Image (cartoon, rainbow, N blue to C red):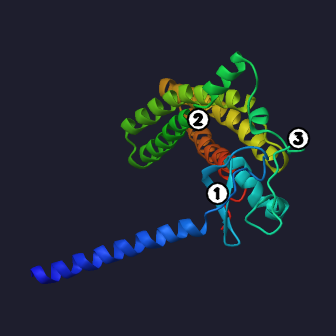
């Protein structure tokens, strides 16, 4: 029994060593003298943000630049040392500076921009609560038990508070962001759909209270309809938010 186990362990060690060697070799293959972002020239790269293009690894300073490159890679190839004729320039003719385009000067504005950074954290709270409320309402329809209606009511009421915080933080985050070109439309849609989602959640909470207090089917079914709308809006708003963070081709197959 011990001999087969020893053989398995030996094979596992050899396989692990091979994987480490392969990973090390891969890192060496993609080693590059690239130091600056090809999209926002003059900005240092973030080695955690990159794409592999035509056998070479291309680095960027932010996910915005990564998405822009994935949209039109040929536009930025001349600026990359990985490719023939690639030159890195960070002179006065640079496209724009990341710090200038994505931050607003002034201590007050910087504070508001910093607070806005918590938008991605806060936004998950109302999303989860809306989904739980919808699930509980479905169970209420199936089981005819009032317990699930109370669960839906509680979650949608708390979701209102989360929605207010998320929308507010999102507006603050938007003040310090400057999405141009192809990113302008997703940014605009994400912003206004987010506001619409917050309003829809507030309407759903109001209808939930009316349905509970007055015990009429009209309010109950109205609440269910608006709650379904909230779920749809959450999904669509998140779709455009994902494009802003991970690039326009994030959902491409």
Q: Point out the tag, 1 or 3, that comes first from the N-terminus.
A: 1
Q: Residue 179 is drawn in which quadrant?
A: top right
Image x and y of residue 107, in percent: 69, 17
Look at the numbered disc 3 and give the secondary structure of its residue. loop
Looking at the rendered structure, which numbered label has been put on residue 78? none
Q: Nearer the viewer, mark 1 or mark 3?
A: 3
Image x and y of residue 40, in percent: 78, 46
Residue at numbered disc 3: 92
Q: Nearer the viewer, mark 3 or mark 2?
A: 3
Question: As displayed, is residue 221 above or below residue 214?
Answer: below
Question: As displayed, is residue 202 above or below residue 236?
Answer: above
Residue at numbered disc 2: 218
| Quadrant (top left/top right/bottom left/bottom right) for the N terminus | bottom left
Image marks 3 and 2: residues in contact by CB distance under 8 Å: no
Q: Point out the tag, 3 or 2, that comes first from the N-terminus.
A: 3
Looking at the image, which residue is at 76% across and 23% down? 105
- Calculate the distance from the C-alpha at mark 1 to the C-alpha at mark 2: 53 Å
Look at the numbered disc 1 and give the secondary structure of its residue. strand
| Quadrant (top left/top right/bottom left/bottom right) for the C terminus | bottom right
Image x and y of residue 104, in percent: 76, 26
Residue 157 in view of the camera: yes
Q: Is residue 194 left or right of residue 227?
A: right
Residue 72 in view of the camera: no
Label total for image: 3
- Calculate the distance from the C-alpha at mark 3 to the C-alpha at mark 2: 65 Å
How packed mark 2 is, by other alpha carbons closer than 10 Å (few <14, some 14-19, many 20 or more), is: few
- Calculate the distance from the C-alpha at mark 1 to the C-alpha at mark 3: 25 Å
Residue at numbered disc 1: 50
Q: Point out the tag, 1 or 2, that comes first from the N-terminus.
A: 1
Q: Is residue 184 left or right of residue 143?
A: right
Q: Nearer the viewer, mark 1 or mark 2?
A: 1
């Amino acid at each position: 029994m011990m001999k087969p186990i020893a053989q398995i362990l030996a094979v596992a060690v050899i396989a692990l060593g091979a994987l480490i060697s392969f990973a090390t070799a891969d890192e060496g293959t993609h080693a590059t003298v690239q130091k600056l972002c090809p999209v926002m020239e003059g900005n240092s790269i973030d080695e955690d943000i990159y794409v592999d293009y035509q056998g070479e690894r291309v680095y960027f300073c932010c996910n915005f630049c990564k998405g822009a490159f994935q949209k039109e890679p040929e536009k930025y190839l001349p600026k990359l040392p990985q490719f023939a004729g690639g030159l890195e320039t960070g002179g006065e003719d640079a496209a724009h500076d990341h710090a200038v385009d994505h931050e607003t000067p002034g201590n007050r504005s910087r504070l508001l921009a910093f607070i806005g950074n918590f938008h991605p954290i806060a936004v998950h709270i109302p999303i989860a609560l809306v989904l739980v409320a919808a699930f509980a309402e479905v169970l209420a329809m199936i089981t005819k038990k009032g317990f699930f209606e109370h669960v839906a009511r509680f979650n949608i009421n708390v979701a209102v508070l989360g929605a207010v915080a998320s929308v507010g933080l999102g507006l603050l985050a938007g003040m310090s962001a400057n999405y141009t070109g192809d990113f302008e439309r997703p940014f605009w849609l994400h912003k206004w759909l987010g506001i619409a989602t917050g309003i829809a959640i507030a309407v759903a909470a109001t209808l939930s209270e009316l349905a509970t207090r007055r015990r009429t089917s009209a309010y109950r079914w109205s609440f269910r309809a608006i709650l379904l709308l909230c779920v749809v809006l959450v999904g669509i708003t998140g779709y455009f938010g994902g494009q802003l963070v991970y690039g326009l081709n994030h959902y491409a197959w």
